Image (spheres, rainbow, N blue to C red):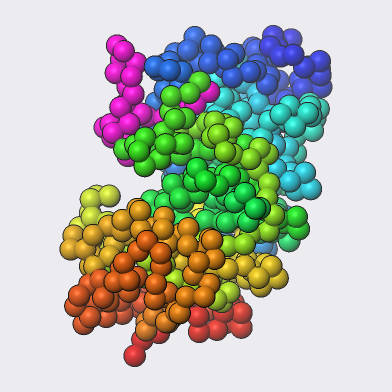
Amino acid sequence: MPVIETDNSDVDLLERCLADIGLRNIESIHWNLSSAQLYEAAIRRREARLAHLGPLVTRTGTFTGRAPNDKYIVDDEVTHDDVEWGSINQPMTPERFERLFQRACDFLDGDEIFVTDGLAGADPDYELPVRVITQHAWHSLFARNMFIRPENLGRKLAADEPRFTLLHVPELRAMPSIDGTHSEAFIVLNFSRRLILIGGTRYAGEIKKSVFSVMNHLLPKQGVMSMHASANMADNGDVAVFFGLSGTGKTTLSADPTRKLIGDDEHGWGEHGVFNLEGGCYAKVIDLSEEHEPLIFATTRMFGTILENVGMDARHRRLDLNDDRLTENTRASYPITHIPNAIYPGVGGHPRDIVMLTCDAFGVLPPVSRLTPEQAMYHFLSGYTAKVAGTEAGITEPQATFSACFGAPFMPLHQAFYGKLLGEKIRRHKVRCWLINTGWSGGPCGIGQRMDIHHTRAMLNAALHGELDDVPMMPDPIFQVAVPSHCPGVPDKVLQPASAWGDARAHAEKARKVARLFQENFKHFADETEAAIGDAGPVLD
């Protein structure tokens, strides 16, 4: 019988649950340990080091980010007809999954494991009890940070209550020639078995994003809009939802000291309103400054925070958040309660505003514009932003990036399904929709200037406070979105891209180029969305 470290009396039932999935010869089990106990275990096992003021610093090895080419969904009777199969949602046969899963169980024979139970979804009507089983103590702490803790809600999950189990075996490498994978890493979702299998990578983000993918399969079928978005709430209860890809300001703009944070990354929108799918945050911290992001900065100095691949002075254990020698994707995982104005559990009413964020490195999209419901659906399905020169090898000029639903890698269902559901909810609840460009103004990257963060915050605040509702607006001649003629705290010239450029002809030429990219990308959705969206996209002469 394995040694079990826990304060839960259901140890026999836990052992049966583990045996049922194939884990029968485990040396020791650590079940639902506290953060302090997991700290001790991670340091004892040399998985991480303690930094000045209390965070835990760890390294993820080869993988310092997600491995999108190594994610699979088991193709069976549950998923065959409703998953959008392709390069994002790659199929794996049930037989191949069983062989790989059995090898993972065998790999853990005689080993110790860490088990953390939590909830995905702060609305009890839609919550999913999840069990995370992993080799490493720090990954168990990550799960404890990122999922909602039942004990904080005055609840205790029974040993057999979790409806999805995630088995994380980072030290097991896949064999592509046998397993049919692209590399040694693998992330596999099996909806029939209610199992998630992750191996070959220590990057903790795979844990949270695989559960998010599960929720994106389950929730929409219940009429719940699942969203790769942050959300916050004003004192009067007005909720704002922020969609945006990495680098667009989703986390920064939602972490507003004057508003209450509902969550920074994953949400559902159900019958009662918006709710966080998580109990923690997973923020990028490269070049983080106390001046511009004080709330997030403070979490990097707190007990309970995990810092992935962050630079640290080995002797004095002081952090260097500007150190990108390992990766620019340095991360902090912390309980959302580390944010003073956070709501826990994260629930709010129906959104008053939806804000879609883009970092347009071409400098042609207006810095703020109002969207119709049809335009909101169009830009949601487009999921546009742009990479700038130097961010990746081979990129020498701005490069357009489209990720449907602002999170295509995590959306198993046909993407138009999410777009239509969003449109229905926007119309039903009369939501104001906005497009904010946090990218360049006055020209493309290299010629123009990055949008002033103070101007961006002024535009966002004006939109959320209703100060743009009665301002005269003119449609952008190419992108058709409604551009305000005035915004408090922002020069009028900044609001009009052509005026900011100073060369109207050069601006129009670049804008048409970007518009053609939008049109080419949207051909994928045209047949399924024509009736709902119409001609909401950009137009060319």
Q: Is residue 1 visible?
A: yes
Residue ID at (53%, 38%): 281
Q: Residue furthest bottom?
A: 541
Q: Nearer the viewer, residue 301 or 517?
A: 301
Q: Residue at x 50, y 49 (%)?
A: 254
Q: Is residue 11 shown left or right of residue 346? A: right
Give yes or no for residue 328 being in the magenta stretch: yes
For the point 58% across and 62% down, the residue is 353
Q: Is residue 279 above or below residue 351?
A: above
Please tell me whether the stretch drawn in magenta is mainly helix, strand or loop. Answer: loop
Magenta stretch, residue numbers:
304-331
Q: How far from the left and from the top, in percent, is residue 408?
A: 51, 58
Q: 346 and 117: which one is in front?
A: 346
**Vertical placement of 202 versus 318: above or below?**
below
In the rendered view, tell whether residue 472 sits above or below residue 294: below
Residue 80 appears at what percent x and percent y? Answer: 66, 59
Residue 541 locus on image (x, y percent): 34, 90
